[in-house]
Each structure stands twice: as structure tokens, then as C-alpha cells.
């Protein structure tokens, strides 16, 4: 059974800090690792990673995948209160398994 | 584009009642999914569909049925609601895997309470 584990479960930091969120996965026929941000509504897509060692970046957010060690990290620099959310990661498999396996998320709280 | 829409946004049911949740997408996506989200449990897949007229079970299918009569719509039915089905339900859609992307786009959710 495929599994995605995120750590920490929750994190509280001050505005301006840098945070690193972790995601480890066990997905048969692994193909992709996705990150989502969920505020008080639907998850919104952040990144999809398929190749090891290639950083994806969007503003203050960046993510990288390590397919040898089966994990990914999401970094947020110079955090702002608007970054407060639950961050979800999910693993996707190759064709024939059309589902994503989600982790339970990391709840990030930014204190002003 | 409206993206993925869900109807209704909120609903309260009594135990044993039935209801249907409607999901619609206007992105011409082949795949559609129904998830439930409970505190501490993350997103759990109920049922999904890889095309019109096809459905498949996910991780937690018991007590739910689905239908995909049209490509743009995916219906989730509860035949006899139970308090354990109190949850937030999300619909999502995506292109098929032949498009080399696994990104799923989510609807706004339906908050269901079963008394």
C-alpha cells in the first residue's frame, strides 16, 4: 500500500523565519511528488516534481525531490502571515494507477 | 472558466437520509475524484473516474456510490447517511496521465453534517 508521511505535523514560527517541511514517500512505480497549500478551503497546487535534484521555485517557496532517499522538502523563506496554512504533499504513480496518495499535512502557523 | 464547482456548499442530514453531491468541471479533464477530509486524516479517496461511464473504488468507498454519465460531471451519492460520514467532501479533476501531468484541481468543498 502506498504511503506518504509528512513532518512535522505542526509548526509555529515567527514572521520572517525560514521553514522546511518534509515529505517522505513509499509509492509503487513512483512518478511524481506534488505539493499543495490548503487554507480554509480547497487545496491549491504549488509544485509538481518528477526529477531528483532539480529545484522548483516560486517566489519565496521552493521544493526539491530526492528519488534515491524517497523524500521531498518544501522551503519557505522570509515567512509571512499569509503563509499560514496546511501544506499537503502527495505521491503519484505511473500510468495504470491514476490516484494520488496524500499525506496528512503539516499545519504551519506564522506569528506576526 | 469556473474550474471545479461543487453543489451544495453545506448540508445537514439526519441519519438514514440520502443525498447527492454534484461536482462539475469545465476544463475538459478526463479524470475526476471524490475525497473526504477529516481532522488528522488528510485527504482520503472515496471513488474516482478515469472517463465518462467508468468509476473505480478508492480507499474509503463503503457507504458511497458515484456516477459519471457526462464527462464534466461526477456525482457522489449517500444512500443512507450515517454520523460517520460527517466530513468535508472535495471533488477534484485532472488531465489523463498521457498529458504528463498529475496535477489535480480541487473544488471548494461541501461540508456535510449527519445528525
Image: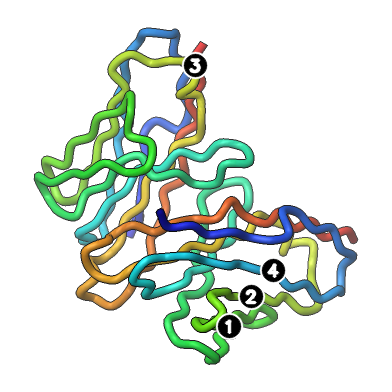
Co-location on one chain, circles 1 and 4: yes
Does B38 appear above or below A10? above
Horizontal side of B52 relative to A37 (left or right) equals left
- Density class for disc 4 (Cα within 10 Å; few <14, some 14-19, many ≥20) is many
Q: Which residue is mark 2?
A: A73
Q: Which residue is mark 3?
A: B83
Does B115 appear above or below A92? above
Q: Earlier in the sequence, mark 2 or mark 1?
A: 1
Tags 2 and 1 touching, CB below 8 Å: yes
Q: CA distance from mark 1 to mark 3?
A: 41 Å
Tags 2 and 4 touching, CB below 8 Å: yes
Q: CA distance from mark 1 to mark 4?
A: 11 Å
Chain letter of mark 3 equals B
* Disc 3 secondary structure class: helix
Q: Which residue is mark 4?
A: A21
Q: Position of residue B63 (x, y in %)?
A: 33, 24
Q: Which residue is mark 1?
A: A64
Amino acid at each position: 500500500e502506498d504511503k506518504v508521511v509528512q513532518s512535522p505535523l505542526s509548526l509555529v514560527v515567527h514572521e520572517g523565519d525560514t521553514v522546511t517541511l518534509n515529505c517522505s514517500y513509499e509509492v509503487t512505480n513512483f512518478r511524481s511528488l506534488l505539493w499543495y497549500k490548503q487554507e480554509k478551503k480547497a487545496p491549491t497546487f504549488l509544485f509538481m516534481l518528477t526529477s531528483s535534484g532539480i529545484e522548483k521555485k516560486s517566489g519565496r517557496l521552493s521544493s526539491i525531490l530526492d528519488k534515491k532517499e524517497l523524500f521531498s522538502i518544501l522551503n519557505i523563506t522570509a515567512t509571512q502571515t499569509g503563509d499560514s496554512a496546511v501544506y499537503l504533499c502527495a505521491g503519484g504513480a505511473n500510468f495504470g494507477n491514476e490516484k494520488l496518495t496524500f499525506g496528512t499535512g503539516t499545519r504551519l502557523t506564522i506569528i506576526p | 472558466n469556473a474550474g471545479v464547482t461543487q453543489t451544495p456548499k453545506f448540508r445537514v442530514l439526519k441519519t438514514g437520509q440520502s443525498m447527492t453531491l454534484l461536482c462539475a468541471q469545465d476544463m475538459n479533464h478526463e479524470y475526476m475524484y471524490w475525497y473526504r477530509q477529516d481532522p488528522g486524516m488528510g485527504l482520503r479517496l472515496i471513488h474516482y473516474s478515469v472517463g465518462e461511464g467508468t468509476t473505480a473504488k478508492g480507499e474509503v468507498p463503503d457507504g458511497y456510490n458515484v456516477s459519471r454519465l457526462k464527462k464534466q460531471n461526477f456525482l457522489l451519492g449517500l444512500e443512507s447517511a450515517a454520523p460517520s460520514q460527517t466530513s468535508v467532501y472535495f471533488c477534484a479533476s485532472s488531465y489523463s496521465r498521457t498529458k504528463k501531468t498529475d496535477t489535480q484541481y480541487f473544488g471548494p468543498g461541501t461540508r456535510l453534517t449527519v445528525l
